[in-house]
Image: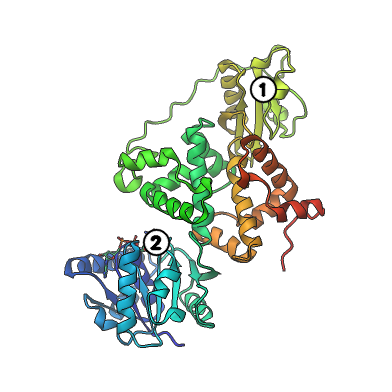
Amino acid sequence: MAFETVGVVGLGTMGAGIAEVFARAGLRVIGVEADAEALARGRGHVERSTARAADRGKLTAGQRAEILGRITLTTSREDLREVDLVIEAIPEVLDHKVSLFQDLDRICKPETVLATNTSSLPVTAVAAATGRPGRVIGMHFFNPAPVMRLVEVVSTVVTAPGVTAEISELAGRLGKTAVSVGDRAGFVVNRLLLPYLNHAAVLLELGIATRDGIDDAMRLGVGLPMGPFALLDLIGLDTAYEVMEVLFDETRDRRHAPSPLLRELVTAGLLGRKSGHGFYGPQEPPKEPEKSTVITFAIDGPDVHGLGERLRAAGFRPSDDPDTVLHCTDRPVIEHAVRLSDPARLVGLHVVGDKVAELAGTALTSPRAAKAARDLMRVAGLTPVSCKDRAGFVTDALLFPYLNDAVRMYDSGYASMADIDAAMRLGCGYPAGPFEMLGYLGLAKVRDGLRALYAEYREPAFAPAPLLDQLVTAGVSEFPRS
Ligand SMILES: NC(=O)c1ccc[n+]([C@@H]2O[C@H](COP(=O)([O-])OP(=O)(O)OC[C@H]3O[C@@H](n4cnc5c(N)ncnc54)[C@H](O)[C@@H]3O)[C@@H](O)[C@H]2O)c1
């Protein structure tokens, strides 16, 4: 089917961007809003967005005028009679979407494809409410739609053969990468991202590390564009909360139940950037640099990170009577500590990437030793992240279950490895997709880390996915790509 004219219903945050995307690709767009006031707001969104692009030199004035000229705005859905495709982007309320789709089904010609941009509602429920369930599909854009390159194309069990391919091809015409997925809550991106964000809130509530420590560890250590709390503030804590509820409803996995901390903040109206305050406040006090004193240290056991060398280069010498004893490890150190004559000095050290040092203090570690370890890491050019002596510390505890979820998702046949990787790279701006990360971390390391997490937290979902376990047992070091 040749898509030449599309309707976009709802010109809010997403719809206005989607209308712009289609118009930029040369299609004619009919944008529909609820009333004249909302229509004016929608027009304002598109005008501002294209003006910004023109200011940055991404569009000429002529191109901008052509794009705006392709968009017709109306408050009457009846104007959608002849369009080839409709994208619905009204608020996330199932009843409203169902009644809109019933109307569109009546209004539009029989071959029109009806698409929803829903993030979390079942596309099947919307499709089943129409007389053309085979021609109803999910087309999930990301915010801001003109910038983000990913579109999740959601088929249901009743989607007609060919429609998914036609819509994916159209996404390609828009300059987007389409990943093709089935109708499960959260699709790929939200299904993998939100449990990770929720888990970060759980770790914060458990006091495993501070907000800044967790954000630093994931941003600087793993290389993600932002830490989980900065991202939650950006998404909106209320939106994240609602998506978690939908995930939990479908999976009954307790990791998908919104963390009590998230609930408390949402109830208090601390919704993130949109309300000016979430995990971060409007005016964050400047971080006071901790005062360094002269520190003595010892490295106990193998120096796997070459830290002794770095510290010696900075003029520090190992000492027989150290302020802090560093033990390089990626596992809790308490068992090791209790075997020492002075366990109060022991701090576990796990370097993540080349910028972050996780410093695990046990129940016996003295505040003096913990502070000395932090000071030393700064001297060595690393950002210290103090954490409790728990399996996975911060980064592995957050990263490995996410990778495990990706393996389970792939193994269930829900999406291909390439699509899952592309979805996380393009939808979240991650430097690598989960299967790419598994490749460079090594399957055995992740499997063993998950076993340690499972043994400590007894969380069923932390048990290594059977496929991961079997590949490691078979001596395979990377996921076989077909
Ligand atoms: N905001 C995001 O980051 C994001 C990302 C991906 C998908 N989504 C999904 O996109 C959809 C829209 O979200 P949003 O953030 O753009 O919401 P929004 O509130 O910014 O915009 C919704 C718009 O729909 C209009 N509207 C409401 N009822 C209407 C009707 N009957 N007819 C025509 N217009 C109507 C409203 O006036 C409003 O302008 C939701 O399903 C949401 O889950 C949102």
The three-letter code of the residue at mark 2 reads Pro
Crowd band around label 1 with a 10 angstrom C-alpha radius: few (<14), some (14–19), many (20+): few
Give ligand 1's quarter of the image. bottom left
Let me know if residue 345 appears in the view. yes
Q: Position of residue 248 (x, y in %)?
A: 48, 51
Is ligand 1 closer than 8 angstroms to the Cβ of mark 1?
A: no
Residue identified by numbered label 1: 315
Could you tell me how far apart the alpha carbons at marks 1 and 2 are, in whole angstroms? 49 Å
The three-letter code of the residue at mark 1 reads Gly
Q: Which mark is residue 434?
A: none
Q: Is residue 184 above or below residue 266?
A: below
Let me know if residue 429 appears in the view. no
Quadrant showing the C terminus: bottom right
Q: Which mark is residue 144?
A: 2
Crowd band around label 2 with a 10 angstrom C-alpha radius: few (<14), some (14–19), many (20+): some
- Ranked by sequence position, the earlier of labels 1 and 2 is 2
